[in-house]
Amino acid sequence: MARDAVWDNKDGLVVGFGTRTPQYTGSYSVASDAANGISTLIYRFRGEDLTDAVAVTDDALLHAPVIPNGSVIKGATLYVVEAFAGTNAVLDIGVYNGATDAAVDDDGIDAAVAVTSIDAIGDTIACDGADVGTVVATTGGVKIAASYDTAAFTAGEAILTVEFVPSPSSG
């Protein structure tokens, strides 16, 4: 294997080979509420770590959990824990193919969130992208990732929660 190669263990652990330079500081987790049949994906990210377009090689997608095909995305909320800054910067939150990491809808969770809407601790955005309230219809499911549009962010940190009802066939 090449020095910069990675593979996933059966348990989802990503194993890297050779010297690696961390480029991604975001984190994900998924919690399930079996009593209500709802799962919650939690995605924490920093504004200055975002790119203009999420690429299939981005660490953000490498570490993202998959919302299975057939699941229903019930809603999503963005909560600011550190004020975002950036001249004319806007935030896009999208969905990406869980098998190939290719963009399905790069602003499907929310589009063009202005920096003025997320420039204070505690700002909360009820996401209203085209994929919120719909059934995941992508073979391989979808992953969630954020990017900037127009201009880069110079600061900021947020927590995105995405509530979904898992597909009955997912498990």
Image (cartoon, rainbow, N blue to C red):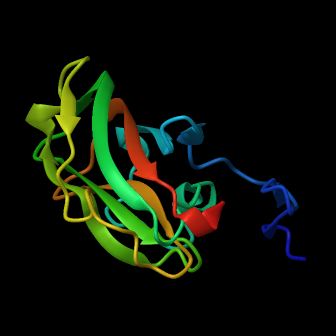
Give the percent coordinates (x, y) of residue 103.
39, 75
Q: Nearer the viewer, residue 23 or 133?
A: 133
Q: Residue at x 17, y 27 (%)?
A: 119
- In which quadrant of the rendered image does the N terminus lie? bottom right
Instruction: Tell me if residue 106 comes above or below residue 74 in the rendering.
Output: below
Extreme top residue here?
121
- In which quadrant of the rendered image does the C terminus lie? bottom right
Q: Residue at x 21, y 46 (%)?
A: 127
Query: How many numbered badges does the structure rendering display?
Result: 0
Q: Quadrant of residue 45?
A: top left
The reply, left or right, for residue 45 in relation to residue 130 is right
Instruction: Tell me if residue 31 comes above or below residue 169 in the rendering.
Output: above
Give the percent coordinates (x, y) of residue 151.
20, 53
Instruction: Tell me if residue 91 comes above or below residue 157 in the rendering.
Output: below
Instruction: Tell me if residue 130 comes above or below residue 151 in the rendering.
Output: below
Q: Quadrant of residue 30?
A: top right
Q: Residue at x 55, y 71 (%)?
A: 98
The reply, left or right, for residue 85 in relation to residue 46 is left
Q: Nearer the viewer, residue 37 or 47?
A: 37
Extreme front residue here?
35
Give the percent coordinates (x, y) of residue 35.
55, 34
Give the percent coordinates (x, y) of residue 9.
86, 62
Q: Residue at x 39, y 38 (%)?
A: 161
